[in-house]
Image: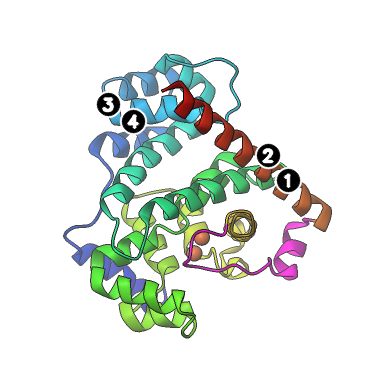
Amino acid sequence: MSDRAAAALLAIRRTSNLPGLSAAAQRIIERVNAPDVSLAELTALIEPEPEIAMSALRMVNSAFYGQPGRVSSIQRAVTLLGVRGVRTVAIVSRLSKMLDVMATGSFSASLLWTHSENVAMTARALASRLRDVDGDDAFVAGLLHDIGYILELSVDRRRFVTLVTRTQRGEQDQARQEVELFGASHEEFGGGLCQHWGLPEQLTAAVANHHAPLQAPLIHRRLAAVVYVADRVAHAETPAFSLDVAAAPDPDVLQFLGVSPETLADVGAQVRATLKAREGSRQTGQTAR
Ligand SMILES: [Fe+2]
Ligand SMILES: [Fe+2]
């Protein structure tokens, strides 16, 4: 482990106002990894947890799942989500809550959340075109990839505002600023947080290496590369989020994944179509209210 990654872990352990997963979410994550888990057991774990149950229904009824008709039963939602999808929901239900309370002056937590959702959706779309990257892992890693920002915000709100202001003014390199202000980057904080929560190693590795995927351990490199590419595609399609990178993906990473310019354009088109559908369903919802 590098000195900076160790510093990030130490900061995580010392941060008393650290956002945490609920006991129920932790139990679900634990059981999802067990070989003898069943959908019936997961349904029974979710049903008494309103936060997670709501999140499961919201997920299967979202444009990402493209389900015809509304799903209102938890049992049906769990069947549609599958075991890994349930793990996603357990994490997501908490993340959106954390982001709600973390808003600060010049930084919009909802923009970070929208960015994370877009990267998740893009990562899944890209993974579906590759044979060896699990779509649900790609989705969760996409949702979590920038979670390190939340940690920086929890460590020192004032310094975080300085980071946002300096980045928005285009002063210096953002990664350098983060190390100067917090002693580690948001990737290192994010990876440390995933480790602290006991999330599977591939998610931790993808989050920790989402800006330099070719440095990830070989067995997790493709997932990290999918998140890296998805981050950049999502930035190009939805440029509102002001922190982080906006450049086109590195050709070496695309070559490593075996993603052609046509496939990339195809993923971009799919993302645009999903965003349009989401926008449409939001507007219909507003009119209906
Ligand atoms: Fe990032
Ligand atoms: Fe990002």
Determine which of the numbered discs, if any, sits on residue 8 in the image: none
Label 3–label 4 contact, CB within 8 A: yes
Residue 214, horizontal then vertical, whole percent = 63, 68
Q: Which residue is mark 2?
A: 273
Left or right of 219 in this view: 78: left
**Residue 258 highlighted magenta (yes or no):** yes
Residue 16, horizontal then vertical, whole percent = 16, 60
Q: Which residue is mark 1?
A: 269
Residue type highlighted by circle 4: Ile
Mark 2 vs mark 4, CA separation in Å: 28 Å
**Is residue 82 in view?**
no
Determine which of the numbered discs, if any, sits on residue 49 in the image: 3
- Residue 249 to residue 63: above or below: below
User: Mainly helix, strand or loop, the magenta region?
Assistant: loop
Mark 4 CB within 8 Å of ligand 2: no
Q: Specify start and end residues of the magenta stretch as a single range.
A: 239-259
Left or right of 148 in this view: 118: right
Residue 52, horizontal then vertical, whole percent = 34, 30
